[in-house]
Amino acid sequence: MAAFRYRALDLQGAELAGVVEADTLRQARSQLKAQGLFALALEGVAQARPGPGRRRLRLGHQALTLLTRQWATLLDAGLPIEQSLSALMEQSEDPACRPILAGVRSEILAGHPLHQALARFDDSFPPLYQALVQAGEKSGQLALVMERLADTLEARHALRQKLIQALIYPLLVVLVATAVIMALMVYVVPQVVGVFQSGHQTLPLLTRALIAVSDFLRLAWPVLLLGSLALAWLARRALARPALRRRWHQRLMGLPALGRLLVSVDSARLAQTLAILVGSGVPLLHALEAGRAVLWLMPLQESLEGAIRLVREGVSLHRALARDKRFPPLLLHMIASGEQTGRLDEMLEKVSRQQQEEVGNRLAVAMSLLEPLLILAMGGFVLLIVLAILQPIIAINQLLH
């Protein structure tokens, strides 16, 4: 049985939208007719793709977290995946959630495993989600994995909210500073400096430079805007190539502060993923393969792939990860301690929390330094503009006296 999304008119002429389950498209139309509905549009949920002017359905982060928590509860109660999806569809109040769950259920009924069904809706279920679900299916611990996955999503949402709150003020400062400086350069400066130019006097160097920059911005701002958009598009296309993206990631990792921050973020993701899977009884090799999907930096992905081969040959995990010296030493020491004591999942959980706290502290310090630097930079630009305008005025006053 498949799921079909419909738009239809009822007997009063009101337009309705929803999801109906049927074996075929013709049967879905028959069900709608039996309900007194005239179908305007009818399409399979799993195969539906957004057309012109249509927005693809997507679960928000909070909706995904709540769905995962409820799903874990239903699976832990012993419900099969198909029945749990039906229950989730009945109790869901999110308009985007029901069609997505119906599409996943259709894929399950068609014989696909759950992680492949989720992959058809990758806008809502990220690679980490799919990888953990696949590992849970292989180990038979899907309910436990889903429960810990919900905890992970909540922790990441809290970290993301903290980051957004820290970035709001600097972004506002940048936007206001840019708007003020552009208004001064494009509108105010030409009118004020035009008075001095009409006097045919030699203007100071700073004033002449300001006039040149102002004229350039007034004439070239459309070209600059289009050039920036084109450059962003070209950069995105270039980073889609694995070789260029790897070199870019390698350079990012080499930066003094940003590189260590990015490595810490990826290491925290890996440690958290391994902690969930190992603690749920998933074999270490399967957990490492799932952890590879959550890493963003390509050099770390390559290091983990090499570590998987070494672990498969019998090398301990901390020695395999230490081969390329790309992962943080703290992560390696905690893994070594966990392997020696037989509490690998606990050590991974601890190092994951420590890495997340380090990322949060580094971001807080960076934002606390960035705010005054932005204000000083804005003040410096405005000061240059004011000095460029005042210098001719001071020169004229000196001549008059």
Image (cartoon, rainbow, N blue to C red):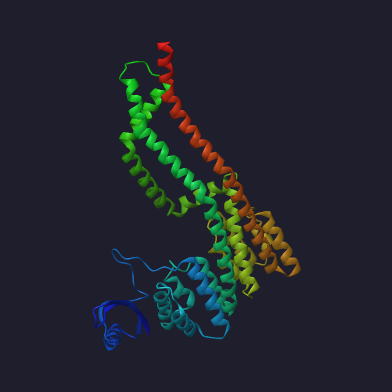
Q: Quadrant of the C terminus?
A: top left
Pick whichever, 288 or 32, lies toward us: 32
Residue 130 relative to residue 343: left or right: left
Residue 158 x/y as whole percent: 57, 62
Residue at the far right in the pictured view = 341
Furthest-bottom residue in this view: 34
Left or right of 127? Residue 306 is: right
Number of numbered markers: 0
Give the camera-side residue of 344 and 375. Answer: 375
Q: Quadrant of the N terminus?
A: bottom left
| On screen, residue 380 above or below 278 | above
Residue 112 sits in quarter: bottom left
> Which is more toward the observer, 143 or 158?
158
| Residue 109 image-quadrant placement | bottom left
Expressed as whole percent of the image width and height from the top left, the position of residue 317 reads 67, 64
Please indicate, yes or no, whether residue 384 appears anywhere in the rendered image: yes
- Asked whether 39 or 246 is in front, the reply is 39
Q: Position of residue 255 (x, y in %)?
A: 57, 44
The residue at 47%/43% (across/down) is 174
Rendered location of residue 285, percent (x, y): 61, 69
Which quadrant of the structure image shows residue 386?
top left
Is residue 204 visible to us here? no
Identify the residue at image location x=36%, y=76%.
Answer: 45
220, above or below 324, in the image: above
Q: At x 45% / y 71%, what residue is drawn?
A: 119
Q: Residue at x 34, y 34 (%)?
A: 187
